[in-house]
Image (spheres, rainbow, N blue to C red):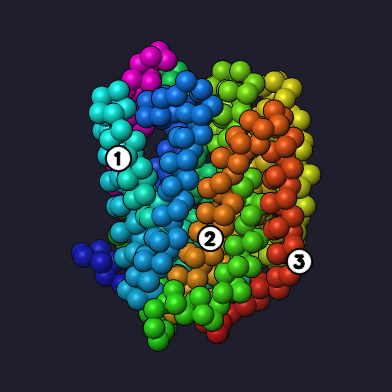
Amino acid sequence: MTDTVVGKRKAHKSLPLIAGSSLAGTAVEWYDFFLYGTASALVFNKLFFPASDPLVGTMLAFATYAVGFIARPVGAVVLGHYGDRKGRRATLIASLVLMGVSTFLIALLPSYASIGVAAPALLVLLRLVQGFALGGEWGGAVLLVSEHGDSSRRAFWSSWPNVGPPLGNLLAAAALAGLGAMMSPEAFLSWGWRIAFALSAVLVLIGLWLRLYVAETPLFEQAKAPVGLPAGVVVRKHWRQVVLAAATRFGENAGFYIYSLFVITYVTKMLGLDQSVALTAVMIGQGVAVITIPLFAILADRIGRRPIYLAASAATIVWAFVFFGLLDTGNTAAIILAVSGGLLIFAAYSSVIGAFFSELFPTGIRYSGVSLAYNLASVLAGSLAPIIAIALYSRFGTGFAIAAYLAVMGVVSLVAALIAKETRTVDLAGVR
């Protein structure tokens, strides 16, 4: 059913179409964000951060990757404020444009050899813009779906924006793998990687077209604006929900960046295998996540959010050690199994995050609340995971030290899930 007019066309209120537009937008934004992360392991460490020790160059590249996470809470506050005051839809359009422009400009950056220290400085600046844009993306995409109704299947519909991160990562890995296969290593390092970043412009136009024709959420249109700044209200009155929600993501977020990003460094640098092995494993694993997130969400609508969180957290603690044991075999099939298993656990987490976070906050501050909680976990767990992993390997020389770190992240999520209350039956309009 459509009845809201946008320009000369009617804005869609159909849940499948709204979910599709949310998925398209998050996939595009995470393609951009993860493309940077994958390139950090393969390209930026050589072109922008030359060092006598390749591992040091990789660590510096990942450090700029983490800078993007630092900007995400700022984006969560600013774009969250705009989303709670002006609407979910307009904010999502703004975040998509910011992300696309910054990623396209990365494709045009000269290397360290051409302009010296200005090259990494500009790279960091554009990374900050990427992080700022992403800080307001996920919350709005989830709310655009969850606030449109069908409470009995809220986890299912709100899980589709969460398909965006693995799908975006899959596209990023596929783009770099395809370009790497079609040209020599020298050509890929010189200019081939830039094509993947330039393609962002095309993807952004597709996502923007889809988002321009979806309706604002009924709950936002009916809600009263909060007294004071939305982020301030969240911090003063709902900080417990923010901390609890963020803690439930520690195992998921740290695991995701170990399974899909750091694994590329581990396989190529520590195990000495070809990058195609790691990229193939990541692509297959991301495909597993894309398929299984909605399936886990169907289960979450039947049994609740909490049981899924508990099972995924327990699995993270165990799989952390299995993961590195499989990697260390050096066998391609075992590496694919390791990554696929890890991203299957990530899929279980992702199936409930959108619904659970939405069910914790009132409508008037919901955009700010879910964005702050989501990005707090991203900073504390996700951004540091690759850097901590490299530091642990440099210190102990074994992947099992990294496994112990990941298991601790799983314990944090497990404790948070044990504390959390079940929210499956919550009425979003009635949250206070």
- Residue 122: mark in rendering: 1
Location of residue 54 with respect to 283 vertically, above or below: above
CB under 8 Å between discs 3 and 2: no
Q: How many marks?
A: 3
CB under 8 Å between discs 1 and 3: no
- Distance Cα–Cα, label 3 vs label 2: 20 Å
Spot occupied by residue 108 in the image (x, y as percentages of width and height): 26, 33
Q: Callout 3 environment at 10 Å: few (<14), some (14 to 19), or many (20+)?
A: some
Q: Which residues are magenta?
A: 183-207
Residue 200 within the magenta-colored segment of the rendering? yes
Give the mark nearer the N terminus: 1 vs 3. 1
- Distance Cα–Cα, label 2 vs label 1: 25 Å
Location of residue 159 with respect to 328 vertically, above or below: below
Whether residue 38 is visible here, answered yes or no, is no
Q: In the picture provided, is 413 more to the left or to the right than 198?
A: right
Residue at left 51%, top 34%? 59
- Quarter of the image where the N terminus is located: bottom left
Q: In the picture provided, is 428 more to the left or to the right than 398?
A: left
Would you name the residue on which mark 3 appears? 418
- Quarter of the image where the C terminus is located: bottom right
Residue at left 47%, top 20%? 52
Spot occupied by residue 199 in the image (x, y as percentages of width and height): 32, 35
- Residue 249: mark in rendering: none
Spot occupied by residue 351 in the image (x, y as percentages of width and height): 62, 56
Would you name the residue on which mark 2 appears? 376
The foreground one among 108 and 149 is: 108
Question: Of helix, strand and loop, which mostly describes the magenta segment?
Answer: helix
Q: Identify residue type, mark 3.
A: Leu
Q: Identify residue type, mark 1.
A: Leu
Location of residue 299 with respect to 53 vertically, above or below: below
CB under 8 Å between discs 2 and 1: no
Residue at left 43%, top 20%? 180
